[in-house]
Amino acid sequence: MTRCPNMIASHVNNHFQTFGQSTQELESTPCYNSISDIPYPFTDTYRRIPTVSANTYDSVLVPITKNELLQTISTLLNHKAAGIFGITYEDIKHLHNNFLDFIVNFFNHILISGYLLNGWNNTYIYPIPKPTDWGNDIKNTQPIILLESFHKLFIKIITVCLHIILSDADILQPNNGSRLSGESTY
């Protein structure tokens, strides 16, 4: 792990040159399961803040309700790129009631078990050409990342819970609160 801009640029360039050719790089990527697994320079950054109660984040693990799911689905934007499996937000908005019950149970199983689907660890980066002729030059593209639509839906529900916690518990430093409702960096 490094903070050297030149080394980071080199690794990013190499990554995109070899992306999709082998799973060897993915398999060799370290997995951090606890604070003790994180490399030394970053352990203090990710250590729990002593002034924040240990149970502050417990509400994130409260079972997701069907109303929460429906509320989140209602906020999904139309005409967005489909997920990896071709499922659009419009498709999700027209799901049968029984399937919505299945999704609630599925999401709650993830909360209880702590395990995501293996496929949800995959993302696809697509270079979208900029408005000008891209001339087969990667620098003239703008990458978008495609995730599975149900993965994004699950993350959106969790993000709303975290948003409430971070707003109510006053955890973020003042200059980090601009993404919370009613907050700015001014």
Image: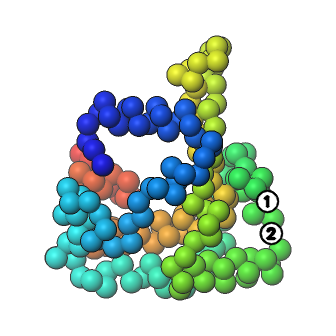
Quarter of the picture containing the C terminus is: top left
Tell me if residue 144 comes above or below residue 35 in the rendering. above
Q: From the viewer's side, name the closer residue of 85 and 74.
A: 85
Q: On residue 95, which mark appears?
A: 2
Figure coloring: rainbow
Q: Callout 2, which amino acid?
A: Leu
Q: Distance between the residues labelled 1 and 2?
A: 7 Å
Mark 1 in CB contact with mark 2 (< 8 angstroms): yes
Residue positioned most to the left: 51
Q: Can residue 82 be seen in this view?
A: yes
Q: Can you tell which quarter of the image residue 68 is in?
A: bottom right
Residue 170 x/y as whole percent: 25, 68
At label 2, counting other C-alpha atoms closer than 10 Å, the crowd grade (few under 14, some 14-19, many 20 or more) is: few
Q: Callout 1, which amino acid?
A: Asp
Tell me if residue 14 comes above or below residue 107 in the rendering. above
Q: Can you tell which quarter of the image residue 58 is in?
A: bottom left
SS type, badge 1:
helix
- Kindly identify the residue that appears in the image at 29 percent across and 63 percent down: 38
At label 1, counting other C-alpha atoms closer than 10 Å, the crowd grade (few under 14, some 14-19, many 20 or more) is: few
Q: From the viewer's side, name the closer residue of 34 and 54.
A: 34
Q: Can residue 64 be seen in this view?
A: no
Residue 114 x/y as whole percent: 51, 79
- Kindly identify the residue that appears in the image at 79 percent across and 77 percent down: 99
Tell me if residue 175 comes above or below residue 131 in the rendering. below
Q: In this view, does 150 lie to the left or right of 43?
A: right
Q: From the viewer's side, name the closer residue of 166 and 183.
A: 166
- Kindly identify the residue that appears in the image at 57 percent across and 71 percent down: 116
Residue 31 x/y as whole percent: 42, 64
Q: From the viewer's side, name the closer residue of 50 and 95.
A: 50
Q: Name the residue under label 1.
A: 91
- Kindly identify the residue that appears in the image at 27 percent across and 83 percent down: 54
